[in-house]
Image (cartoon, grey):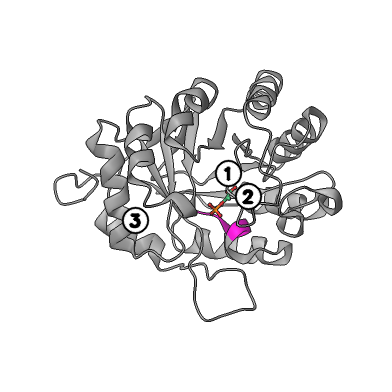
Amino acid sequence: LVSRENHRERSIVRVGGVPIGPGTMTLIAGPCAVETPEQTLQAAQMAKAAGATLLRGGAFKPRTSPYAFQGLGEAGLRILADVRAETGMPIVTEVVNAADVELVASYADMLQIGTRNAQNFALLQAAGEAGKPVMLKRGMSGTIEEWLMSAEYVAQRGNLDIVLCERGIRTFEKATRNTLDISAVPVAQRLSHLPVIIDPSHSGGSRDLVLPLTRAGIAVGADGVIIDVHPHPETALCDGPQALVDGDLRELAKLVRDLPPLV
Ligand code: PEP
């Protein structure tokens, strides 16, 4: 269903009216985690000023450590909905558990499935039935074929509004959190008709890598980019060191504004 064999044209997925796909370089940005109404609104305003048309923000956080901040849950979803009303930005937010899909889908414009759940087949199937577009991150140890098979689980449930997100894979390299597999973008676009975006924030794990990796994504033809932004990264409850701040955002805005016409 997601293969290009029977579907030669590359697909455009619309999220609350915002297109992601060929001819676009959609900027999705916002806080890694929703912490407070003020922090989420400020991050959304920063993202919007940089050219973002979709707001990201985690209310359910899949943390490696069970002692780390796990997200605000439904209270976080309510904050996102308020910020959407205030800014007009549709929301992309993660769901980590099949039992929460209906709840998250009642607030979200797009459901995010994270790298740690890339092969949680019950969750993929539930997301496929939720009636909302799905952003599917690549498993950090998953092959491109496994990633596409995961997309197939969503598609099988009648939902072809799927966006693939390359977010870095585990390699022997320790200087970055994960290694952004830049070749995965054209390979996935060759094999599948689905849009492919990159996450330079979670792959590198470091603010200084976000703009260079974004440039790399644009160069290989990514259909979009999803980026962490925080008004006060030094106090962030999740992944502060990778969040962009005002100066970087001005550069990001310039990068997105100066893009040549995309075909
Ligand atoms: C995220 O985008 O909030 C996230 C946790 O990303 P990943 O699943 O890629 O680690």
Determine the secondary structure under disc 2. strand
Mark 1 → mark 2, Cα distance in angstroms:
8 Å
Q: Nearer the viewer, mark 2 or mark 3?
A: 3
Q: Residue at x 31, y 46 (%)?
A: 151
Residue occupied by mark 1:
27
Specify the quadrant of the image occupied by residue 53.
Answer: top right
The picture places residue 7, in percent across and down from the top left corner, at: 18, 44
Mark 3 → mark 1, Cα distance in angstroms:
22 Å
The residue type indicated by label 3 comes to Trp
Q: Earlier in the sequence, mark 2 or mark 3?
A: 3
- Which residue is at the far left? 6
Residue occupied by mark 2:
227
The magenta-colored residue range is: 198-202
Q: Is residue 58 above or below residue 187?
A: above
Q: Is residue 142 above or below residue 56?
A: below
Q: Residue at x 71, y 20 (%)?
A: 86
- Whether label 1 lies within 8 Å of ligand 1 gets the answer no
Q: Residues within 10 Å of mark 1 (few under 14, many from 20)?
A: many
Mark 2 → mark 3, Cα distance in angstroms:
21 Å
Q: Is residue 180 above or below residue 248?
A: below
Q: Residue at x 67, y 46 (%)?
A: 32
Magenta stretch secondary structure, dominant: helix
Residue occupied by mark 3:
147
Which image quarter holds the N terminus?
A: top left
The residue type indicated by label 2 comes to Ile
Q: Nearer the viewer, mark 1 or mark 2?
A: 2
Determine the secondary structure under disc 3. helix
In magenta segment, residue 41: no
